[in-house]
Image: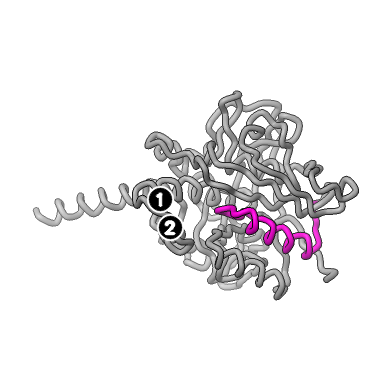
Amino acid sequence: MQKVMRLVPYVMNKALPEANETPEGIRLIKAPEIWAKGFKGKDIKVAVLDTGCDITHPDLKDQIIGTKNFTDDDEGAPELVNDYNGHGTHVAGTIAANDKNGGISGVAPEAGLLIVKVLSGENGSGAYEWIINGINYAVDQKVDIISMSLGGPEDVPELHEAITRAVQNGVLVVCAAGNEGDGDTATEEFSYPAAYNEVIAVGSVTLTRDSSEFSNVNKEIDLVAPGEKIISTLPGEKYGELTGTSMAAPHASGSLAIIKQMEESLFDRDLSEPEVYGQLIRRTLPLDEYPKTLVGNGILYLTAPEVLAEKASNEKILSAY
């Protein structure tokens, strides 16, 4: 299997020497409101399949629960997940950065991060075999969520089989939808593995809830999340502002961690993969000005049930007059 998969393309807007804030994307999806209820992803395991991670970054080091390298970087040393690109560190920060040492918070600042390096070098490319092995490894480690901000144009049966196995084992698989969008909602663009039905495909919107022109269009898009000018961690105790569906997907991955913790606490039992997915979709708001092939069920908004209930109540009161 010689085919190669690459990072879902992204744009580095700017590097930041320091940051000390809750990023605007985290606030936009209302994560702090869920934290206030006591749910920050504790005991939930998220596997980040990417370019590796700076596991010594002060905002990430306490959340790392394991590492595994499937690439040929560092002579293939299995324990080394050095991030020579920066993409994986940025994704990890959006999911679970913890600001107790200063810096920024991710969506689920108490979730555990299993760093699985499947893309190598500064350009972030990887053999399909590495990614398939990484998925299977994450499943064997009994993670709750797999987050992948990567993709390729080809439907590879072995990749689909690995993802199907993950979902059958109760793992939620989240992927960036892809940045091949041409601004024409009448045309479709597919990136795999996001285009598989078993995957939660996440498109991008701006911080003002406008659809990102580059975000892929197809019937498999499940939802959208902030993906433009997203601040997160970078190697070397640094921070950066990046753009792409690569940045939208980890917002959903982190959200699934706090949703799973919260709902299993309320139900007092483990929830199945479809049940947690259903709870995620409950926490979206429709963007009716755009077709579903672009925005799926709408924008990720963790307090959506309360917002929609209040709206329904107000409409009921108005209709009584």
Residue 240's place in the image compared with 191, above or below, is above
Q: Is residue 130 magenta?
A: yes
Horizontal side, residue 62 vs residue 273: left or right: right
Q: How many circles with numbers are drawn on the protein?
A: 2
Q: Quadrant of residue 132?
A: bottom right
Q: Which residue appears at 52% of the width and 41% of the height?
A: 108
Q: Is residue 185 at all visible to an observer of this figure?
A: no
* C-alpha gap between disc 1 and disc 2: 6 Å
* Residue at horizontal 73 percent and vertical 41 percent from the top: 53
In this rendering, position of residue 21 left or right of residue 137: left
- Point out residue 283 in the picture as x, y percentages from the top left corner: 40, 53
Q: Position of residue 78 (x, y in %)?
A: 81, 48
Q: Amino acid at mark 1?
A: Glu
* Secondary structure found at label 1: helix
- Which part of the image, by quadrant, shows the N terminus? bottom right
Badge 1 density bin: few <14, some 14–19, many ≥20, Cα 10 Å: some
Left or right of 82: which side holds 198? left
Label 2, residues with CA under 10 Å away: few <14, some 14-19, many ≥20: some
Q: Which mark is residue 264?
A: 1
Secondary structure beneath dot 2 equals loop
Q: Are marks 1 and 2 in contact (CB under 8 Å)?
A: yes
For the rendered model, the colour scheme is one colour
Tell me where the magenta segment starts and ends, as one range. Answer: 124-147
Residue 238, given in percent of the width and then of the height, sits at 71, 30
Q: Is residue 54 left or right of residue 307?
A: right
Residue 171: percent from left, percent from top = 55, 59
Q: Is residue 88 magenta?
A: no
Residue located beneath label 2 in the image: 271
34 vs 204: above or below: above
